[in-house]
Amino acid sequence: MANNSKIIVDLDTLISHIKDGCRLAIPTDFNGMYSGAAVAATRALIRRGVRDLHIIGVPTGGLQADMLIGAGCVKRMEAGSMFLGEFGVPPAYARALKAGTIEMRDSTCPAIHAGLQAGEKGIPFIPLRGILGSDVVSYRKDWKVIDNPFGENDPILLVAAINPEVMLMHAPMADRNGNIWIGRRRELAVAAHASAVTLVTVEKIVDADFMRDEQLVTGVLSNLYVTAVSHQPKGAWPLSFGREYDEDAEHLRHYVESARTEEGFKAYLERYVFEREVVPA
Amino acid sequence: MANNSKIIVDLDTLISHIKDGCRLAIPTDFNGMYSGAAVAATRALIRRGVRDLHIIGVPTGGLQADMLIGAGCVKRMEAGSMFLGEFGVPPAYARALKAGTIEMRDSTCPAIHAGLQAGEKGIPFIPLRGILGSDVVSYRKDWKVIDNPFGENDPILLVAAINPEVMLMHAPMADRNGNIWIGRRRELAVAAHASAVTLVTVEKIVDADFMRDEQLVTGVLSNLYVTAVSHQPKGAWPLSFGREYDEDAEHLRHYVESARTEEGFKAYLERYVFEREVVPA
Amino acid sequence: MNIHPQEFLIALLARKIAGARHVAVGSASPLTGAAALLASELSDTPMRVTILGSKNHVFFTEGSRELFDASAQGRIDAFMMGGGQIDGQANVNLMGVGPYPKLSVRWAGNYGTPYLYSLIKRTVLFREEHTRRVFVSKVDYVSAAGVNEPNVFRPGGPSALVTSLCAFDFDRKRGRFMLESVHPGHTLEEVKDNTGFDFDMPERVPVTAVPDSRVLGTIRGGVASQIAETYPQFAERLFGVGRRAAKTA
Amino acid sequence: MNIHPQEFLIALLARKIAGARHVAVGSASPLTGAAALLASELSDTPMRVTILGSKNHVFFTEGSRELFDASAQGRIDAFMMGGGQIDGQANVNLMGVGPYPKLSVRWAGNYGTPYLYSLIKRTVLFREEHTRRVFVSKVDYVSAAGVNEPNVFRPGGPSALVTSLCAFDFDRKRGRFMLESVHPGHTLEEVKDNTGFDFDMPERVPVTAVPDSRVLGTIRGGVASQIAETYPQFAERLFGVGRRAAKTA
């Protein structure tokens, strides 16, 4: 029989699915809507000392990626752009690029979405209109431009499927069976479908079955795609989380200032990641 | 300013967007879930005497298609299969094939879904795994098999994008701005996105704004894609409609028996379409 | 113990999908639905059952496309389907009889079978009627191909064929059926006489095993009440379990 | 009437997208957001405004992919964006300064611009800072290309460029900017001195029109309260309308 009771685990068990060298997909973390960055899980990953991650921003990267990069956990970063909302370019990322310690695979947001859709459909590539003429095409050797087989003298871009090994995200709630309510951010479901393993931290776990609620179910990622769930209230802190809480702008400002230098970043990690100091809500 | 008050119209205005020769997408009409076949609108189309439709079943065809075919409104039918639930192959369709009065473009369900996804993305084609070896590939001259540009000696099917001129469906409810709650049948949203015009009949119109309800909104087709909405309670009769009403099995049996002969079908149309006799709920 | 022939087939089909993580069946056949639920009940490891058209046995939240994408993702590893004609290479015809596209008889069409048959790890073919009308030397139209050229990407394919007379295994490399066993009360001659294609045989053809009392008890207990939700008439006829019983179960 | 330079730019940008059915703007720029809302308020025909990152001015229910698909469908026909560098062929660089991939300065990256700039019917480029640092002869990296070879499928592209000094139109056939007008208080010499690329000019260069009182009233009324929802600090600074006012509006 299907038995999902073991799907709900503690945070260290959750992140144990993320191995060194893993192709890890993470959501955009500056977004006005529900669901997003599993920052508490990111801190746990740094504490564990994961190495050589290939991070895929869906479709961009921000705080999560910057913390992992600064902590030396990342080998390669792939994203449509890298930004910390109004705070601009992530500082640890900028330092790592200068030092040449990470490889940046620049993309464009719709190509990441399309690559994940190809991954979801189990197809090796997907065509995409536009983009031609951009330097992103010349530098992405893993993409191809072909003559449209359904047209004539009509060049079209093909982007490769993206199939992450792990998708990690934070969501508003899970039911007792590990079904996740992600709301309207369906791109997170696409990324989960395309990934071999999906790990989710949630604000709350509800003693219900979302699959039987015809209204809720439309915002659900079925547990068919979910490997493990962990209960992490305020799991997106210091980022905002939809209508649940606003971003901790003061803390973010402190992060950005600290992360400008290696020493500052180390002190930040020591205090907020290793000693687990969390600014009270 | 955006003004959607004119989006809610009467049934004849709604179907006035469906011209002779139109490429018309319609949902599967035997499905256990919410949303589906706009049968009341289909009867109105027959009364108006629309001609030469190219119907695309999303991904199959049933009662709606059969009524339109029997009434001489259809030139070409495209579907993954044609069936009337437990009643089997639609009788007017079977007669039309024998008589050679319609062209059948046989497909397979995932190819219709993928073609509509390509239509949604504005790309001319999309690859699909599997299917090779099926006769559907040899007979679909509008599909192509190429060697995967990302592999070697790896044949893969490309299906052409499907961009219907009109998508017609029935849904549980609309809000005052013409946003449609379609529930978990997201394939209907994909078809609407891929179509130039989307027409929707609904069981009820609610004085609300679904876009501001974070739970409801996840099951919504935004009015960005909706051309017109018409209030048609029991608009799917005699088919079932999710949890709102069961199928009228007795009426369907009567339809299937009538439609076996041209005379029987004409008598059925006369009574239920032109004289608008509806079996009371 | 008195065993209904359909209970016998349910148990046999369930054995054919043992060990799967997630089995999908079409909505047309209550027997395959019951077999999937039985296999899940008997499984030591978690086994999901998706019955298309059912309200409770569905893990999808995004509509009818999700089945196909999930199959391509490898999240469904067993499938059961029937066929209007089936030939010795395990080609399946759901389109009709006679030369396509005219056809002398039209069936419903391909559905998703050309896709699912290629991508889901193993498909068990099931057709109760065992006649030369069904089991032909060559299908009139290939809806879903039994085998492909070796360079074609094809993670899945046919693994077995179950009928009212016997069970076959399918050898994908050779592209041929091998008779596995003949059901009690039937003979090899009967199978040969009613099969239009050539197949392989072991030296001694065993008799198909009869379900034991534990399996029968599971069929008549948990499976019957679950199947009644989707196929109330079938459950009523076979088990005397009606829709109401299922709903309160 | 006293006109703030940013109000002047809002009015100018709004004229550049007049007649659109649906305009989208990025979340980074309150000025373009205000311009889109103004254009919608002044439009005779319905004009939708999508402000990415806003809660009220979004017509999407399926997350961040939908913007791109809707653009490819032609459901968004006007777009406004900025650029770190912009050259005379309307190429836009959002990647950084210096040879790629090393770069001496890194910006945020391409976002969706290589796609949207090609597919949305018209894009109005906007950059307040008018210097040779921004308006270069050739961008260091092409994030989004101004023009393509004639055989490339490209339904959209740049239509205009607005700065704090002047407004250009873009001629897609010639692949060149044409100076349209210079803002009051500025001169042609100033534009030339601060532009690193070559551009065309009419014989007489007009002065950019100043918004009339009706337009200004609309900016300070409906637009200010709507913009405060997404950009409370901006609205507070420019109009004295805070977040609280917006929420009750």
Image: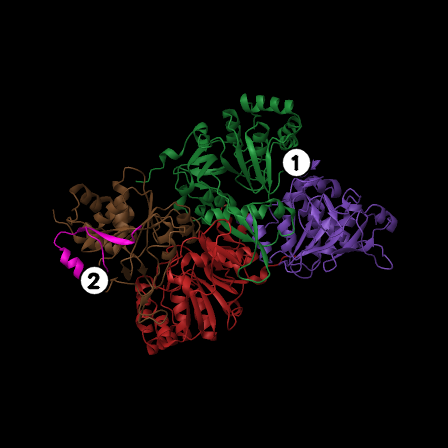
Chain colours: A green, B red, C brown, D purple
Indicate the quadrant where residue C91 lies. Answer: bottom left
Quick check: marks 2 and 1 in contact, CB under 8 Å? no
Give the residues drawn in magenta, as a range: C172-201
Indicate the quadrant where residue B57 lies. Answer: bottom left
Q: Secondary structure at mark 1?
A: loop
Counting from the top left corner in percent of width and height, residue C80 is at 30, 52
Q: Secondary structure at mark 2?
A: loop
Q: Which residue is mark 2?
A: C131
Q: Chain of mark 2?
A: C
Q: CA distance from mark 2 to mark 1?
A: 71 Å
Residue D58 lies in the magenta-colored region: no
- Mark yes or no: residue D1 visible: yes
Residue C195 lies in the magenta-colored region: yes
Circle 1: residue type: Val
Task: Look at the image and tell me in which quarter the N terminus of chain B lies.
Answer: bottom right
Instruction: Specify the label residue A89 is tagged with.
Output: 1
Q: Identify which residue, C109 or B155, lies in the foreground.
A: B155
Circle 2: residue type: Thr
Q: Chain of mark 1?
A: A
Residue pictured at 76% horizontal, 44% vertical:
D134
Counting from the top left corner in percent of width and height, residue C238 is at 20, 53
Counting from the top left corner in percent of width and height, residue D96 is at 69, 40
- Image vertical order of residue B49 relative to residue A63, above or below: below
**Mark 2, other Cα within 10 Å: few <14 / some 14–19 / many ≥20:** some
Instruction: Specify the label residue D14 is tagged with.
Output: none
